[in-house]
Image (cartoon, rainbow, N blue to C red):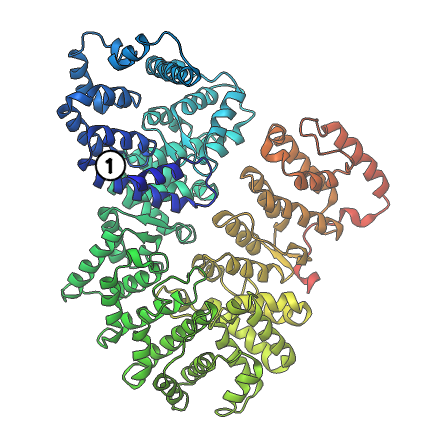
Amino acid sequence: MLKIFALSVLLDMKDPLIFEIQQRQDLRLEMINSLQILLPNLSLLFATLLFIRCYSLYEYQSVAFHQMAEIIIEKFSNDKPNQEAAFIALKQLRNPEFSNCFLEFIKQKSDLSEIFQLNSSILYECLNKRNSFNSSNTLLLSLIYTTELAFDMQILQMKRNDDEQSRISNWKDLDELWNDLSTNEKIMSVKIAKWITNYLNSPNKNNLSKIIENVLCCLFIEPNALSEIEKWLIYQTDKSLQYMAYYAALQLIIHGSNSSDLFDIIKKNFDCIQKCNFRSLLKRLIESEFVNLSILRQILTLLHENVGYFRQISVYIHRTEVLQLILDLEFERNTSTTPFIIIVKECSYDLRVFLLEYLKKYLENPNTFKEEYIAILCKWMIENSIWNGKKDDFSDELYEYILSLLHNHDFLQIQKAIASGFSFVFTNYEMYEEHLFLRGYGVAHLEQVIFFFDEYSSDILNICLLAFGNYLYLTQKSNRNLKISDELNQALENIFNSSLPEVIIIRAAFCLIIAQRSLPTFQVRRNLFEEKWTLTPEKEYQFLLEKTLFHWEECFGDDYKIEKEIVKHIEKNSSKLLDIFARNFHDYLCDKSNFNYLSPPTVNYVKIAYKAIENNFLLFQKSIQKCIFIRDVPQAEVYQYLYHKTDQSDIEALINVYIMSGVLTNELIDLWKWVVNVYNDEIPVAFTFIKQIDGENVIEKLFEFLYSMVNQRKFSTFENLLCLLHLLAQDSIVSSSELYHQVSIILNDLSDEFNSINWIDQKSTFGTLLEFTSIETINLSDKQVQLFTENDIYDEFMKTIENLEKRPTFFLARNSSSSDMK
């Protein structure tokens, strides 16, 4: 009981900053599961107390509360002495599930008011025998009176008309309702839903952007508000209100609607949904206990067709039916290189038990056996262990069964998948010190491969050496005094001195260096590698590339430490290495096998190219531009790379490599727009490197991009584009007069929006806009002041034009020919 009370207190906190949303969800499930187990064994009064205490979670687990309500009804019928107290307490919930048993109870009472007025015989005797009250008795009497007033207020609350409840007189009242909700998890109440419905029907919608922003934060909704938001579906074709329709459609699906029309709304407008903040709502839909499985299948398929968006959603699954559906979709998949199953970040312990039986049954049936399918599941489950590797919920039997398949030589693809899964685990930044894998669980399987290396394929040994080396690094990072055995050290030396492929020997050497706790300095590598090879610049370049896979930077606190080391080595030997690196980068982007989920870890040439151009622009720009200019590497290949990256640093690196090429093309604008729409608005972009344009109608496309960022309220990209246009105007690539004209159109179109808090808070954006219109002295500190008028802009602009008339380059054509630039 104390555990349930403690959890309920934590979950009732308005904004508990110590918990992420996923952690809060885990706590909810833990509390409700504990309550369900405990409730049948409690008395009516204790059961009622805990039920009411946890009732605020009804919206999240209504099925569980329905089951618990049935238990309390049974106890209520069998416990006559305590019915009055339970009736008073439960009545305040206004839960229709108690209606029948309450009706029977009320029929047995001649005067129901006696119950609510607390006319207890004990209280009567206490008051009747006293002629005076001392200070302590006065306090007692005050408390009793206050308690009775509280019950009176509750009765009044029960009798309030629903329509009266939903009336909100003004914006101040609405703000108070929003503010009463947690900033992390808002709940759409009936009050707010009805107010918004009335607002959407009104002609004045000055604060629409604020309404939409707050609505999208409401991941949860009161069940009796569903009928209200269903009215918003009519706005699906309204450009200003379409997001309200999408929100309503998703919430109705979350709560079990099986209407095919709802999915049609989502499918038809999925491009718009991707551009707005609907990921959290889609996550909740997949995790919902009520969602119709047929509609869920369609939505998962739709998400999977948009791979970049799909890979950014991760869910916690606790329904066997949903997991089985995802497994079926994965089994049926035969086109994309992205598995359906990777959307599942975690699943409950009972589902991991289900997975064990599922794997065993599947492997025992040769008629349906599909090795790639099992390989994907094995790798996914090992990667999954990063988030469920705590001892109290770790499924030893499941993981021991999976790891045993590493030694089954009949399934080479499964072996490689398990080894790659290990490698992923030991290079993941989210690994924590208490994780069982980090404390040695399963590492014996890697050591077995090293001991008996001649019994395993080169591919398996290669990946296992990489995983083992990174495991040694992580143990050093966590300050564990791990010492490998003399036998294992000898096995690594045997591999190093063998005639196996060169990459295997290099990785064995790195494992020896790490095992000996040597600092990974250049000299240490030279001493060891000089025993085996003549260290040419090309050979040292190869060693450095392999070093990136051992995540040295994680131990030394510099995310790009190794990449910078490689760049310096290329700079020093540019005549021999520059073209080699450029070809490596080109081949890396075009090699589709790198993007297969089952592919082993490979060198990330994109990050190296990013640091190369950033550190030595003059040396690297032409070489990389010549080999990977966006028209030479097919755009589909670039998107393919982005599709399979969820790490923002990878996305940032690739988009900036192309932007740093210095030439703005239609393809580059498409790429930039795609990154912003599918990922986020905050990725830093080095737009100041752009000095030329190449292609037809590039500037028109740039302005279209600018308008789309305005409509989507993506302020960072909007400001970047304004600044880029300003720089192009200064270089006479864009006509300043047209820039003024286009900015004026934006200001006119958004005159209402500029009065909303979303835009006014973007002071830097306003500063940029004002700079273009030559009005730079307006005080932006007072949000209520009218900032400028159209006449102000025009007058100031005409003064500027008069001063610039003597400059003939001011009106140069916008599109320079590609021949002029070469």
- Residue placed most toward the observer, 504 or 12: 12
Q: Is residue 204 left or right of residue 382?
A: right
- Residue placed most toward the observer, 788 or 125: 125
The residue located at (36%, 24%) in the rendering is 228
Badge 1 crowding class, 10 Å Cα cut-off, few under 14, some 14 to 19, many 20 or more, is some
Q: Residue tagged by mark 1? A: 64
Measured as percent of width and height from the top left, residue 596 is found at 37, 65
* Badge 1 element: helix
The residue located at (48%, 67%) in the rendering is 589
> Image quarter for residue 770?
top right
> Image quarter for residue 610?
bottom right
Judge whether residue 371 can be spotted in this image. Answer: no
- Residue placed most toward the observer, 515 or 753: 515
Measured as percent of width and height from the top left, residue 627 is found at 56, 70
Q: Amino acid at mark 1?
A: Ala
Judge whether residue 731 can be spotted in this image. Answer: yes
> Image quarter for residue 9?
top left
Quarter of the image where the C terminus is located: bottom right
